[in-house]
């Protein structure tokens, strides 16, 4: 079950440390060059050609060009996630979740390097690529949130409804046998666990966000308190089991709605990516063909 360790569950701790170091190194590098080029970036566009850092930080400059290449390289490598996701023989190459974490790392750092490459001056046809990149990266944040709503193994593979229902039955058994919960308690818990799936996707999302931000925590606490007479140690455990059970009930009740929402999100996220790459190709072709902005003095 999602979130439950098993003998074959991969260990994520060393990976998380490496990921954190990569974020720190990547963001540190971006911040360093932002500071180093600040006086250039803050100069009005019309006066930049006379700035001493012009040949370094302009988009085709000695560093500016490298920022663009680094950004594009990252936004190319990030698609190894899709390859790993679709080719089952590649399962040996690590958990899907780790690959998604790398997709996200590259999807954040890549655009930041492209922003440095642009030197904060975006216009003409390449702006379509630029703003598509911004849209795809920002929509990724929302996609990541939705992704977390779909039950998965710790390795990141999707669970079936039957697997989630099995885990739910196991929690019902525990609540009945270990805590003495009755039908009325289970019904109250079910009611507090999830918004009504027929409410419409917009309202559903708002309700989920409110819940995840902890704004509706009181409802579950009230359900937990409604089972009186437990010794304090057991009452503490009950709160944890109630939270797990509520999450499962929410995922089961909203199964179709969340899968539909995630599907809609994919339909928006991908075309932005395609438009971005198409116009970046045009941009590179035009820049190489005209020699515009490349290289030295
Ligand atoms: C320029 C940057 C980005 C590009 C071009 C991009 C592109 C893509 C593409 C094409 C997919 C579909 C993959 C597939 O189903 O095979 C995808 C999936 C996804 N991306 Fe991004 N992405 C970018 C940035 C981000 C960021 C910044 C995040 C999160 C903060 C993110 C989160 C996700 C998630 C959660 C999925 C869904 C994974 C799945 O359904 O298996 N992406 N992205």
Image: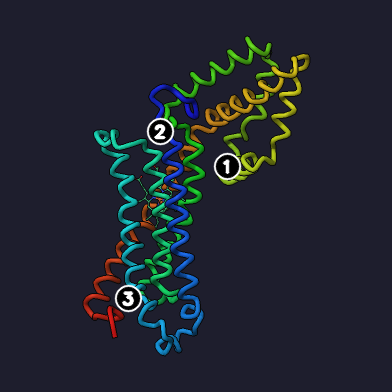
Q: Tell me: 65 left or right of 14.
A: left
Q: Residue at x 41, y 90 (%)?
A: 50
Disc 2 under 8 Å from ligand 1? The reply is no
Q: Tell me: 219 left or right of 70.
A: right
Q: How many numbered tags mark residues here? A: 3
Q: Residue at x 24, y 80 (%)?
A: 291
Across and down, in percent, residue 31 comes to: 48, 65
Residue 155 - label: 2
Q: Quadrant of residue 176?
A: top right
Q: Can you identify the residue that label 1 sits on?
A: 200
Please tell me whether mark 3 sits on a helix, a strand or a loop. loop
Residue 240 shows in the view: yes
Across and down, in percent, residue 33 comes to: 44, 69
Q: Residue furthest left?
A: 289
Which of pointers 2 and 1 indicates the residue nearer the eye?
A: 2
Q: Is residue 49 above or below residue 26?
A: below
Q: Tell me: 264 left or right of 220.
A: left
């Amino acid at each position: 079950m999602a979130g439950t360790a098993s003998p074959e569950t991969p260990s994520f701790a060393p990976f998380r440390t490496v990921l954190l170091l990569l974020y720190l190194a990547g963001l540190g590098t971006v911040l360093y060059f932002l500071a180093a080029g600040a006086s250039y970036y803050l100069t009005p566009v019309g006066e930049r050609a006379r700035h001493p850092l012009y040949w370094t930080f302009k988009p085709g400059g000695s560093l500016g060009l490298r920022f663009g290449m680094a950004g594009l390289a990252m936004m190319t490598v990030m698609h190894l996630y899709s390859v790993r996701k679709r080719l089952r023989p590649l399962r040996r190459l690590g958990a899907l979740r780790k690959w998604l974490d790398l997709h996200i790392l590259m999807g954040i750092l890549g655009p930041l390097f492209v922003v440095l490459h642009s030197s904060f001056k975006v216009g003409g046809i390449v702006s379509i690529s630029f703003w598509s990149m911004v849209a795809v990266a920002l929509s990724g944040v929302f996609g990541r949130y939705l992704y977390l709503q779909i039950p998965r193994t710790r390795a990141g593979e999707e669970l079936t409804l039957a697997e989630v229902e099995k885990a739910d039955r196991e929690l019902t058994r525990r609540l009945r046998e270990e805590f003495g919960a009755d039908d009325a308690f289970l019904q109250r818990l079910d009611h507090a666990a999830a918004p009504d799936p027929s409410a419409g996707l917009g309202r559903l999302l708002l309700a989920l966000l409110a819940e995840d931000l902890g704004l509706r925590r009181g409802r579950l606490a009230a359900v937990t308190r409604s089972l009186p007479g437990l010794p304090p140690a057991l009452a503490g455990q009950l709160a944890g089991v109630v939270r797990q059970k509520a999450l499962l009930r929410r995922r089961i009740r909203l199964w179709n709605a969340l899968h539909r929402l995630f599907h809609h999100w994919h339909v928006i996220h991908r075309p932005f990516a395609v438009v971005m790459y198409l116009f970046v190709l045009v941009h590179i072709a035009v820049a190489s063909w005209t020699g515009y902005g490349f290289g030295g003095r």
